[in-house]
Amino acid sequence: MGKIISFINQKGGVGKTTTCVNMASYMAMMGKKVLLLDMDPQGNASSSMGINKEDKYKTIYDVLIEDTDLSEVIMPTKVNGLDLIPSNVDLAGAEVELVQMENREKTLKRHLSAIKGVYDFVCIDCPPSLGLLTVNALTASDSVIIPIQCEYFAIEGLSQLMYTLKLVKKHLNNTIDVEGVVLTMKDARSNLGNSVAKDINKYFGSKVYDTVIPRNIRLAEAPSFGEPICIYDPKCTGAFAYKLLTEEFLKRNSTDYIKIN
């Protein structure tokens, strides 16, 4: 059975989508069969993989609201072994429409259960909020990865996020746990960044990955070209960091992987 992981932080601009897209891409490059699920109405994970938001295609909205079969929505990507379930702005209305549905928190879980065994990992890019879309993702997930920016307000809102996880664990998914915490956008020259990293390590302990993602202009550029960093610029420092992070993730999961240069 595959493992379903939600990438979550209700604070925007922390590198959540960047981390989800690039870890999923490197997992696939390292020999894993991976599904990237875009649960954010902004559709940034989809556009990061080259999907044109103006094109007509079925999305996760059709799955959640129209009960469309996942096989009609899943599409291949530029990365061999990585498939995508896209999203677009239509998903914004799903928050309201789901409220009317029976077992609304478990809609995504019901659909993913049919294909979970097909993939080694399902990576869900959650919206930067703690609404019904995020609750659906958490209910369907085995664990969460929390990207946290190395800046002053990084820990702001973490208590609310952890409280939401606690509620989901108690009422909807008693096996969910924190997979890991990723420190992102770190400026090695900044004393503040080092201080924040120290505080986060104190808060989460061994859950914090050793690999830290630096600020890197190539990482910021890649989504506008519709490519993950492993394709856009595999030699940049950002690419090297995400490759190391993915290797660390797979080691923690005791999973064999193909070493790439």
Image: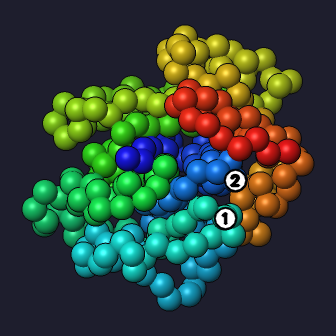
- Callout 1: 10 Å neighbours few (<14), some, many (20+)? some
* Residue in view at x 85 percent, y 56 percent: 233
* Disc 1 target residue: 80
Q: Residue at x 13, y 66 (%)?
A: 100
Residue 165 against residue 53 in the figure, above or below? above
Nearer-N-terminus badge (2/1)? 2
User: In which quadrant of the rendered image does the C terminus lie?
Assistant: top right
Q: Callout 2: few (<14), some (14-19), or many (20+) C-alpha neighbours within 10 Å?
A: many
Callouts 2 and 1 close, C-beta under 8 Å? yes
| Image quarter of residue 76 | bottom right
Circle 1 — which element?
loop
Residue extending farthest to the bottom is 56
Residue receiving disc 2 = 29
Identified by mark 1, the residue type is: Asn
Q: Position of residue 200 (x, y in %)?
A: 57, 19
Query: Toward the viewer: 89 or 210?
Result: 210
Say which amino acid is labelled 2: Met
Q: Is residue 83 visible?
A: yes
**Looking at the picture, does residue 64 appear above or below residue 158?**
below
Q: Which residue is at a point 55% across and 56% down the rendered structure image?
A: 33
In the image, 15: left or right of 6?
Answer: right
Residue 50 in the image, given as x and y percentages of width and height? 67, 73
